[in-house]
Amino acid sequence: MPWCEDCAKFWNPNSLPVDGRCPSCGIQLAEPLGLPEGEDIRAPWHFKLLVAATVVYLGWRTLQLAGIVD
Ligand SMILES: [Zn+2]
């Protein structure tokens, strides 16, 4: 049964919201439901790398169009 340190209270798993957070203080008590095991909802590192590379490329192209660099 999930125990909330901050509230000094046990929560019935059935009374917890699906995100597994304490209803009164919002601390993460249990694994969120409805997500497959091990799936990371954040963007993967290679996606961030792709975005960063695109930003750098577009910035470079902008400078080229502005005639600042050759
Ligand atoms: Zn709490």
Image (cartoon, rainbow, N blue to C red):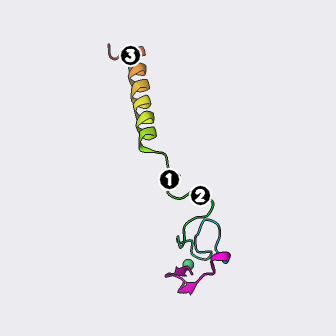
At x 57% / y 85%, what residue is drawn?
A: 10
Q: Which residues are magenta?
A: 1-14
> Which quadrant of the figure has residue 31?
bottom right
Q: Secondary structure at mark 2?
A: loop
Badge 3: residue crowd in 10 Å (few <14, some 14–19, many ≥20): few
Residue 40 got which mark? 1
Q: Which residue is mark 3?
A: 64
| Amino acid at circle 3 | Gln
Q: Secondary structure at mark 3?
A: helix
Indicate which label's residue lies in the foreground, 3 or 1.
1
> Which quadrant of the figure has residue 62?
top left
> Residue lying furthest right in this view?
15
| Quarter of the rendered image showing ligand 1 | bottom right
Q: CA distance from mark 3 to mark 2?
A: 45 Å
Residue 43 or residue 33, whichever sits in front: 33
Q: Position of residue 46 (x, y in %)?
A: 42, 39
At x 63% / y 77%, what residue is drawn?
A: 13
| Amino acid at circle 1 | Asp
- Image quadrant occupied by the N terminus: bottom right
Q: Which residue is mark 2?
A: 35
